[in-house]
Amino acid sequence: MTNSLNPIQEDKRTAIVDILRGWALLGVAIGNYVDFRYIGLDRFIQKKGAFSEVISFFNLTFFSAKSWTLLSILFGYGFAILINNVAEKGKNPVSFFCWRMFILFAFAFVNSAFWLGDILKDYAFLGLFLLLFYRSSPRTILISSIVLLVFIPFLTAYINSIKQTLPDVQSTAKYLKLFYSDNWLDVFQFNLLGTYYQEMINLPYAITVHVVMFALMLLGFYAQKINFFNRLPELKKSLKRTLIITFFLAIASGILFQIFLKQTVVFTYFNPVFWTIISTMLFIASGICLLYANGKLKTVFNYFRVSGKMTLTNYLMQNIIAFFLFSGAGFKIYNTLPYWFYFFLAIFVFTIQLFISKWWLDRYNYGPVEWLWRVLSYRKMFPLKKTVQSDIVTDVKPIL
């Protein structure tokens, strides 16, 4: 064993984690692209056709907010692996991870210039708080996560009751002029202002969403502590049980949400919307894990896996592509097309990325942004292009 600090070796990556990242990335693409339809003065009065209504319902049920919540779990899982790797080498995990999160903040700033819904800054910020738990026992981590998850409906209701006057960047004429401008710097300014007003100081996002993210990061941290994703074959019964429980929890919390929505007094103190989102996300994730453990959809999962290995690169590229398609600095599509167009365009872009990711990783060790992040994090160069020897090793690597 060497004390040299290096990234996690390829043969130690857990396939299902990358598969889940790939699935989440699809939902992120759909959510971000659909959101472009709501940038404009008419954002609240646009009507959908019958087909778009069906697509919208499907998106709301299976994708909306399910992706960033799943990615939060996977971020916590990855955090635990990284911390263990650094500690095993006798290095200071706190200083290393703080530096790594600082670099992620830099990526977040660049991404925020292209898209006002950046999520990297949130993971970088909350990642620093995860350091408070890196010496904690699995029990402490799990209890902390559960307490936060139970508390969320009360927090959601309370935060939503606080009146806050902020400009709606996406529907205010003076800001929209920036979005419609053919000057790149104007559009960058629009996105940075949107990030600031809609996420950084907007209380429902700045507080509630961050608490949800952190609770799920702790859940992912706990999953790594018990080696959950590497034990799927022996946990099939537990996965089936989780699948059934989360299915009924999603339905029950969804019904509660609809009932309380009409009961203003109750809804002021208890809003279970995130319970519905999290239950549905866990239902979908459990289903994917169960399919994987049973050896189903191998070809599909292999493509999702390579996409998940390049999550950061693919995420940034999705937003850059959208920047050129929708803004005044590009093709000026704006919000002029039906809802279904944005939905299926996201799927198309993601599908192309699947094939590009496979082509790239057949030739290179990392995605380009992943490679840059590693180089900056570890402050040393790593070979980007695969050698003949590394290709041979890749062919015989175990799945888990």
Image: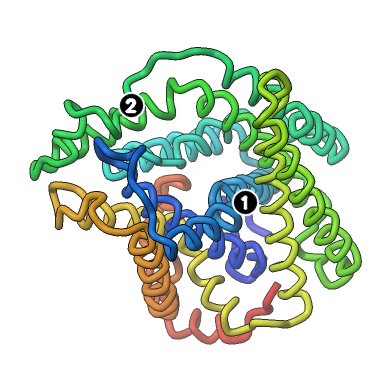
Give neighbour class at mark 1: few <14, some 14-19, many 20+ (Cα, 10 Å): many
First in sequence, mark 2 or 1: give its number: 1
The answer to which of 87 and 78 lies nearer the viewer is 78
**Which three-letter amino acid code belongs to the residue tagged 1?**
Leu
Q: Is residue 370 visible?
A: no
The residue nearer to you, when weighing 271 against 399, is 271
Helix, strand or loop under label 1: helix
Residue 58 percent across, percent down from the top left: 55, 60
Q: Is residue 48 left or right of residue 322?
A: right
Please identify the quadrant where the C terminus is shown.
bottom right
Residue located beneath label 1 in the image: 70
Q: Name the secondary structure under disc 2.
A: loop
Q: Position of residue 288 (x, y in %)?
A: 69, 68
Q: Which quadrant of the structure image shows residue 48? A: bottom left
Can you give x and y, in whole percent of width and height, for residue 145 in the image?
77, 35
Q: Amino acid at mark 2?
A: Asp
User: In the figure, residue 369 lies in which quadrant?
Assistant: bottom left
At x 36% / y 24%, what residue is drawn?
A: 197
Residue at image location 40% in from the left, 28% down from the top: 198
Q: Position of residue 332 (x, y in %)?
A: 15, 53
Gap in angstroms between the C-alphas marked 2 and 1: 28 Å
Measured along the vertical axis of the image, is residue 51 above or below residue 376? Answer: below
**Residue identifier under label 2:** 168
Residue 297 falls left or right of residue 222: left
Q: Residues within 10 Å of mark 2 (few under 14, many from 20)?
A: few
Q: Is residue 257 above or below residue 349?
A: above
Can you tell which of label 2 and label 1 is closer to the viewer? 2
